Amino acid sequence: MSNVVAYNRVPKVTFDFWLIKLMAVTMGETAADYLAVNMGLGLTATSLIMAGVLIVALIAQFAQKRYVPWAYWLAVVLISIVGTLVTDNMVDNFGITLITSTLLFTVALSATFALWYNSEKTLSIHSIFSNRREAFYWLAILFTFALGTAAGDLVAEQFAIGYLGTGILFGMIIASLALGYFMLGLDAILGFWLAYIFTRPLGASFGDLLSQPREYGGFGLGTIITSAIFLTAIAAIVIYMSVTHEGEELA
Amino acid sequence: MKQIPLALILIAAPVALFFAGNAYLVPHPAEAAAAAKPSQSLGDLSALKTIIADVDKIANTGDIVAAEKRITDFESAWDDAQSKLQALNAEAWGVVDGAADKVLKALRAKSPDTAKVAETLTALSVALDNPDGVPAAAGGELKVSGIVVSDANGHALPCEVMIKSLKEAITTNKIAQANSAAANDFVAKALERCNADDDTHADEFSAQGLALASK
């Protein structure tokens, strides 16, 4: 590969980007539930195995040196699964309360942005062309997922507004942020990361709404069918993006 | 840097809007629970409760003869009110009447057992407090199998906390070995609900598991 042209290694933020991100999250939640409950390996073993798979996927993504849809979105789906498992682990196995983990991930995410800005003098997601910048980018993604999971679970726990209610609440927050970005001059990078956090509980609540049994307020599709539906949709969009080269840009 | 305040407003505004709409459309969980809780169907039983408290005090001194004398006041008051109370709620009347019969039997036994008297008196005062068989909830606390599963506002307790105490009850053998399989089953069910962010149902399973400790 020529070193003269530097590609942005992560996609441009388009409508399809958010669509696929939301589905990746939904699938992450249902797949994590399925793996932890049905595989019979227990939460700890499942988490370690999935973390191993994630590391392989991230190595593949870093090796591309440019945005390749399958590698990028595979890493996002796996981060979504591992992020959910990590939060479940912290709460179930280590007894850390959701309030503590929400604060912990807020601090970790802020620290990541501080170090990123300190080192690169920018937080731009349009110029991820070095391994170091890409490492900051993925670390921030990991913490937004973990923060979104903890904050979403906290809301579900404190307010008991049901899966649909939670979905509507976070949908309204995202709509408000979009309004702020398009009409009120909300900074693009700040808006992007905030939307990234809030799409986690939005996607998770829709995943739960579809997959959970009717007696518990879901549609009763089950975790396998729900995960399969979203995996298929993600694969279709990834193929479409690969063919059309949507989301690719020069750094 | 007016970006951060702008972002906070953009997040807070829809949250406020949502909860305002939610409060308008859906009754508050604690209020709903309070509304769903049937009021005491037998009306005011405080006069009867006073007598039973008296009997209990006397019985505690060991003077069963005096206690038996005082309970006759209860007996006649209860019999006088029978037709009125039975018309209000025959089932609730039966709950109290059954408990009262046990007290009378214990007090009038040939050789009264003070422990038995105390036990039946406690059962009777519980029945008088709550003749409808609804757990006597302090404030808005909800209970399952006699175990508190919510805070005073009717919010489900964090499912992780309840699962932890259930697990502890199993490992410390508070739950009999014979019931440990059933208890572990409740742990699994509660964990499954808990992971699906469904604290209310998770807590119900945990409470059913914890209730095994008293068996």
Image (cartoon, coloured by chain):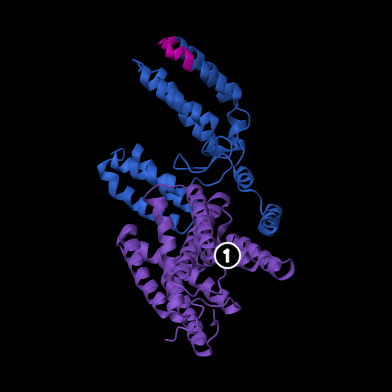
The quadrant of the rendering that contains the C terminus of chain B is: top left
Q: Quadrant of residue A71?
A: bottom left
Taking depth in this image into account, of B151 and A82 the one nearest to the observer is A82
How many residues crowd around disc 1 within 10 Å: few (fewer than 14), some, or many (20 or more)? some
Residue B59 magenta: yes
Q: Which residue is outermost to the bottom?
A: A243
Picture residue at 56% right of the left edge, 58% below the top:
A162
Answer above or below: position of B195 versus B75: below
- Please provide percent x and percent y for residue B8: 66, 56
Chain part drawn in magenta: B56-65
Give the total number of marks visible in the rendering.
1
Q: Residue at x 53, y 67 (%)?
A: A203
Q: Can residue A188 be seen by looking at this rendering?
A: yes
B5, A228: nearer the viewer: B5
Q: Indicate the quadrant containing the N terminus of chain B: top left, top right, bottom left or bottom right.
A: bottom right
Q: Label 1, on which residue?
A: A193
Type of the residue with mark 1: Trp
Name the secondary structure under disc 1: helix
Question: The disc numbered 1 marks a residue on which chain?
Answer: A
Q: Position of residue B172 (x, y in %)?
A: 29, 38
| Residue A221 seen from this side | no
Q: Residue at x 44, y 79 (%)?
A: A65
- Give coordinates of residue B76: x percent, y percent: 55, 20
Which chain did the image draw in blue? Answer: B
User: Which residue is most to the right?
Assistant: A183
Q: Nearer the viewer, residue B60 or A23?
A: A23
Chain coloured purple? A
The image shows residue B44, relative to residue A94, as above or below, that is above
